[in-house]
Amino acid sequence: MLGRLNHVALAVPDLAVAVAAYRNTLGAEVTEPQALPEHGVTVVFVNVGNTKIELLEPLGEGSPIAAFLEKNPSGGMHHLCYEVDDILAARDQLKAAGARVLGDGNPKTGAHGKPVLFLHPKDFFGTLIELEQS
Ligand code: CO
């Protein structure tokens, strides 16, 4: 079911500071910020060749990463995103195996304009998993 690692996501308290660190200190290629109100975050992607790093900053009230940043004020690894060929088939297979899909169980449109789902971190060793249809 699992395809390639699409990205590793880091939650950061200040996106401009994080972008400057990746662009200027680490010398990486960073995309322009993209607001995703439906997900409560603003994102950029850092291109590192074999995968991407997603930097997430809270957007609006009740952002899903606000509680994470309260526990990790300087930021930290938030989720891993794996590609799947067919997100609905993957969801049904995971649910049948007892894994919990977050939200209402229906895919939302992610940062790349493709359907995404999130899996409960307690089912996967403390790591939040995002699935993106490739
Ligand atoms: Co992501």
Image (cartoon, rainbow, N blue to C red):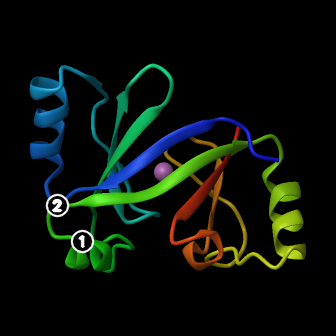
Q: Which residue is mark 2?
A: 13
- Image point (39%, 24%), residue name: 48
- Image point (39%, 73%), residue name: 64
Q: Nearer the viewer, residue 34 or 65?
A: 65
Q: CA distance from mark 1 to mark 2?
A: 7 Å
- Image point (25%, 22%), residue name: 28
Residue 55 x/y as whole percent: 31, 47
Residue 22 x/y as whole percent: 19, 32
Residue 36 x/y as whole percent: 40, 54
Query: From where the camera sits, is residue 81 visible?
Result: yes
Q: Which residue is mark 1?
A: 69
Residue 97 x/y as whole percent: 86, 73
**Ligand 1 closer than 8 Å to the CB at disc 1?**
no
Q: Determine whether the residue tagged by mark 2 lies in a helix, strand or loop.
A: loop
Farthest front residue? 125
Q: Would you say the residues marked 1 and 2 are in contact, meaning their CB atoms lie under 8 Å apart?
A: yes
Q: Which mark is residue 103?
A: none
**111 up-or-down from 32: above or below:** below
**Residue 65 image-quadrant placement:** bottom left
**86 up-or-down from 105: above or below:** above
Which amino acid type is marked by label 2? Answer: Pro
